[in-house]
Image (cartoon, helix red, strand yellow):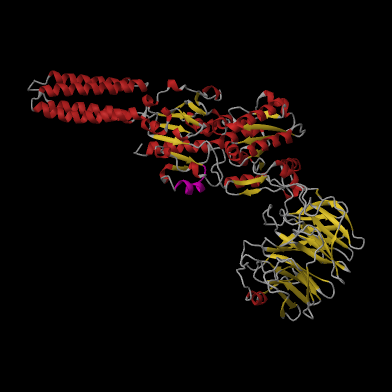
């Protein structure tokens, strides 16, 4: 029997007991008319009780006989109302006993709960299915699946849709015209659309808005049709319908803190998502998929490509550009086939909200189908496609990505903001701000991403040796200067926080912590030089000059020198570094030129005493310095003149008589290098390399046979701000410079003044591909960047060098409860417990 019917007849038995007391009272007062009416009411109540019991209980003969006898008793009372000798007291006691028998029977009637599931979109049925399965197997429940109609909004109006025919064949669908919620008054109603009239793209029929449903049920339950990461977007947190909904199922306890800001805690239950049950179950079964897909798959890996509504709406043309790029990658691939599953409302959304993109989207869709690029998936059950696929590519905002996550299948997140052509260019970016020559190789830390690299100077091929531990894989300018000592490389931290030692023989990294910096968010060091067993680090924003003993691993910090020159700052210099790159060792003396004043510090590394010189004009600031054996040559940080300074005499000379055609004001130069009889000045922003004759001081342009003009870029994606990444003397005769034109290495012979250009290529790009946490939403995945593209990811799927399935599953256990396939059972049991043990229901 239904609970609400049982409640009604129990209330009727209570009313009958009260009526019996009143009947006894009015018969004693000889109010016979009232008594006759009351007896008739009692008979009608007994008849209603009997009818209700007969309709729901199969073995009800005995209690029906008892009800009939009760009615006979009422008839006898009516026949003897005027009989003064009739013992009404004993008769009333007798019918009360009979009514107690009836009441006890009713109390022991087993309740049958009616549960109705109201999906509107067949593709979202997976958010309910495992709950329905659990409820269907419960002998105390009658379950109904009633797909409801919805309106799809277009630019010209609305279209009524119904997807009842699209549900799996094993689901016994009931047409909504055949199930009246007001009449049936289901005990529990499950919904997955909480938006009522507030959705801009679709709306369920108004009869099924939450406030209408709540009128006819004790328990309205909302199960989200989506899965999110650790956090919950605010758009899901405070919907008008939540005040009518009795319980909201959320995927994890960690998400409670988001919902509780808006929703009473008693409405929230953290039990996971039935969507997970669906894929877990299917993944254990034999894979079954449409026949027409088999000829396309053959023995190839299936790559699931997901396009979402949020991506289309946010990135618009860029989203369509990315689609076009993805299609081009998968055309005619031998080892992979693309399974494209667009969001089922993509066309409706574009037509309604971004009509200017609708035509191009349709053209891309048609191209995919006509050119047979892959599998075009419009099936209603995404779970089948997920378990069939080997990996995911798409945006992070879709629930689908998390279903791949819990199954332990590799995830590659697209960045729709990155143009595809930029990915292809920057994927080969070889950039560094210093390099160390070891045999025929140049070792360096990339300034575009976290990697220690070595380049073969004869071929230009770059091998990524490895990523520095505990640093962001896509971190830029993490390390700058690099020095080799005793078969070890030392890397000076620029934006990183630790010194790094790399053992060339053993091939492992060691991180060496420094004292906490003054400004952790800023650059720390720009240069590093060697003296005996020591390394000296030149600070940019760090609050000391640092000496590191490579023998015993100890540090010493010198801050007094900084304080001495800092007292003379005559302007706000918080955002100006103490030093840039001006650092030189002359014997036992360490020379440091300030980038904030005209001060040069002379530090005796033996006595640890220092002297401060003021060089040239008071307004001078310095960027880099070089020694020719007699004088120091200093390029400016801000001014235009190059300074020549004699440390012993204090004499200074300024050079600014640049050759005709020279263009360069502030930040003109990057480095100055002594080449015997002349100095070479490499540009930052200037339009030429400057040659200065040491004897005469004459300045001229140093022309190299380059296939481009100084300052040019091959295309807009080579966007390093300086003309060169670095320029450095590697022996008495040769200079190497890394050009920003196209990341080519320029090898300059200072004797012949000729050069050789080596185009640099990364030959193991996947060494910088990594899987891990990608913010609050994605606990384990790999991301597209300006360095990593889809083809790199596909290579990783084949080589299997980086991806760790168990780590991915563990990461997902931290953000989603019950990923063992039991969520549906737990939801059903919880809701049933609520309505059976809670008096409010």
In the rendered image, residue 347, in percent from the top left (x then y), is placed at 58, 29
Left or right, 52 with respect to 746, comes to: left
**Which image quarter holds the N terminus?**
top left
Q: Quadrant of the C terminus?
A: top left
Judge from the rendering whether residue 576 lies leftward or rightward of residue 834; answer left or right: right
* Percent of width and height locating residue 470: 67, 57
Q: Quadrant of residue 808?
A: top right
Question: Which image quadrant for residue 509?
Answer: bottom right
Tell which residue pokes out farthest to the right in this image. Answer: 752
Q: Main secondary structure of the magenta part?
A: helix
Q: Is residue 331 left or right of residue 85?
A: right
Question: Is 259 contained in the magenta span?
Answer: yes
Which contiguous range is marked in magenta?
251-260
Viewer-nearest residue: 834 or 103: 834
**Residue 338: x, y in percent?**
70, 33
Is residue 417 visible in the rendered image? The answer is yes
Taking the view exactly as shown, the residue that stands out farthest to the front is 660
Q: Is residue 718 above or below residue 297?
A: below
Asked if residue 532 can be seen in this view, the reply is no
Nearest the viewer among 273 and 676 is: 676
Front position in the image: 76 or 556: 556
What residue appears at the point 72 percent right and 51 percent down from the top-left corner? Answer: 719
Asked whether residue 617 is drawn in magenta, I would say no
């Amino acid at each position: 029997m239904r609970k609400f019917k049982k409640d009604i007849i129990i209330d009727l038995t209570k009313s009958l007991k009260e009526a019996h007391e009143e009947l006894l009272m009015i018969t004693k007062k000889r109010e016979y008319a009232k008594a006759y009416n009351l007896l008739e009411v009692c008979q009608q109540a007994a008849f209603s009780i009997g009818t209700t019991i007969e309709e729901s209980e199969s073995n009800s003969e005995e209690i029906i006989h008892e009800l009939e006898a009760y009615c006979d008793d009422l008839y006898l009372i009516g026949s003897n109302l005027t009989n003064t000798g009739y013992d009404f007291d004993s008769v009333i006691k007798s019918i009360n006993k009979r009514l107690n028998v009836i009441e006890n029977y009713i109390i022991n009637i087993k309740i049958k709960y009616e549960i109705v599931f109201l999906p509107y979109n067949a593709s979202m049925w997976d958010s309910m299915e495992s709950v329905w399965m659990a409820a269907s197997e419960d002998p105390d429940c009658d379950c109904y699946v009633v797909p409801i109609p919805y309106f799809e909004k277009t630019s010209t109006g609305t279209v009524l849709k119904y997807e009842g025919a699209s549900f799996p064949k094993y689901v016994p669908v009931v047409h909504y015209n055949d199930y009246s919620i007001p009449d049936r008054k289901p005990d529990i109603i499950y919904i997955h659309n909480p938006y009522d009239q507030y959705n801009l793209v679709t709306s369920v029929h108004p009869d099924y808005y939450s406030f209408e449903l709540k009128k006819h049920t004790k328990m309205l339950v909302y199960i989200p049709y989506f899965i999110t990461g650790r956090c919950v977007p605010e758009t899901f947190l405070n919907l008008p319908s939540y005040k009518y909904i009795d319980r909201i199922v959320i995927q994890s306890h960690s998400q409670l803190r988001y919902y509780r800001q808006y929703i009473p805690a008693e409405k929230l239950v953290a039990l996971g998502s039935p969507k997970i049950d669906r894929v877990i179950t299917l993944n254990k079964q034999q894979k079954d998929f449409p026949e027409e897909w088999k000829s396309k798959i053959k023995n190839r890996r299936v790559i699931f490509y997901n396009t979402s509504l949020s991506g289309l709406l946010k990135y618009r043309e860029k989203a369509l550009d990315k689609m076009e790029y993805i299609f081009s990658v998968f055309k005619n691939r031998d080892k992979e086939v693309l399974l494209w599953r667009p969001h089922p409302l993509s066309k409706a959304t574009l037509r309604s909200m971004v009509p200017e993109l609708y035509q191009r989207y349709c053209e891309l869709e048609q191209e995919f189908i006509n050119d047979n690029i892959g599998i075009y998936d419009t099936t209603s059950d995404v779970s089948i496609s997920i378990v069939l696929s080997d990996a995911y590519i798409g945006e992070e905002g879709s629930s689908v990505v998390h279903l791949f996550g819990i199954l332990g299948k590799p995830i590659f997140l697209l960045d729709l903001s990155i143009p595809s052509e930029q990915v292809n260019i920057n994927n080969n970016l070889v950039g560094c701000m210093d390099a160390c020559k070891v045999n025929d190789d140049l070792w360096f830390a990339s300034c575009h991403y976290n990697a220690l690299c070595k380049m073969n100077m004869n071929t230009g091929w770059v091998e990524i040796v490895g990523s520095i531990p505990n640093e962001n894989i896509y971190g830029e300018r993490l390390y700058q200067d690099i020095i080799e000592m005793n078969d070890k490389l030392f890397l000076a931290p620029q934006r990183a926080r630790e010194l790094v030692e790399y053992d060339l023989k053993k091939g492992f990294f060691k991180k060496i912590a420094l004292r906490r910096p003054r400004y952790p968010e800023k650059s720390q060091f720009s240069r590093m030089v060697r003296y005996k067993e020591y390394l000296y680090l030149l600070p940019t924003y760090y609050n000391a000059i640092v000496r590191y003993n490579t023998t015993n691993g100890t540090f010493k910090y010198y801050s007094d020198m900084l304080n001495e020159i800092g007292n003379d700052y005559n302007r706000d210099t918080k955002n100006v570094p103490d030093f840039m790159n001006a650092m030189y060792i002359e014997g036992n003396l360490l020379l440091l030129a300030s980038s904030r004043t005209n001060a040069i510090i002379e530090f005796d590394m033996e006595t640890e005493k220092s002297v401060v010189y003021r060089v040239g004009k008071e307004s001078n600031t310095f960027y880099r310095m070089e020694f020719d054996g007699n004088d120091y040559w200093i390029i400016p940080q801000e001014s235009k003149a190059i300074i020549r300074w004699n440390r012993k005499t204090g004499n200074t000379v300024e050079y600014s008589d640049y050759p005709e055609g020279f263009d360069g004001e502030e930040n003109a130069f990057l480095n100055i290098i002594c080449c015997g009889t002349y100095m070479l000045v490499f540009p930052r922003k200037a339009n030429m390399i400057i040659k200065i004759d040491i004897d005469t001081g004459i300045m001229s342009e140093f022309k190299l046979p380059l296939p481009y003009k100084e300052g040019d870029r091959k295309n807009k994606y080579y966007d390093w701000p300086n003309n060169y990444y670095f320029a450095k003397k590697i022996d008495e005769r040769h200079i190497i410079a890394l050009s920003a034109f196209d990341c080519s290495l320029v090898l300059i012979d200072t004797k012949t003044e000729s050069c050789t250009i080596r185009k640099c290529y990364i030959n193991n790009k996947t060494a910088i591909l990594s899987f891990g946490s990608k913010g609050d939403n994605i606990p384990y995945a790999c991301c597209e960047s300006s360095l990593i593209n889809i083809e790199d990811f596909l290579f990783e799927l084949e080589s299997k060098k980086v991806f760790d399935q168990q780590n991915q599953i563990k990461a997902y256990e931290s953000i989603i409860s019950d990923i063992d396939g039991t969520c549906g059972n737990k939801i059903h049991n919880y809701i049933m417990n609520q309505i059976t043990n809670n008096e409010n229901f």
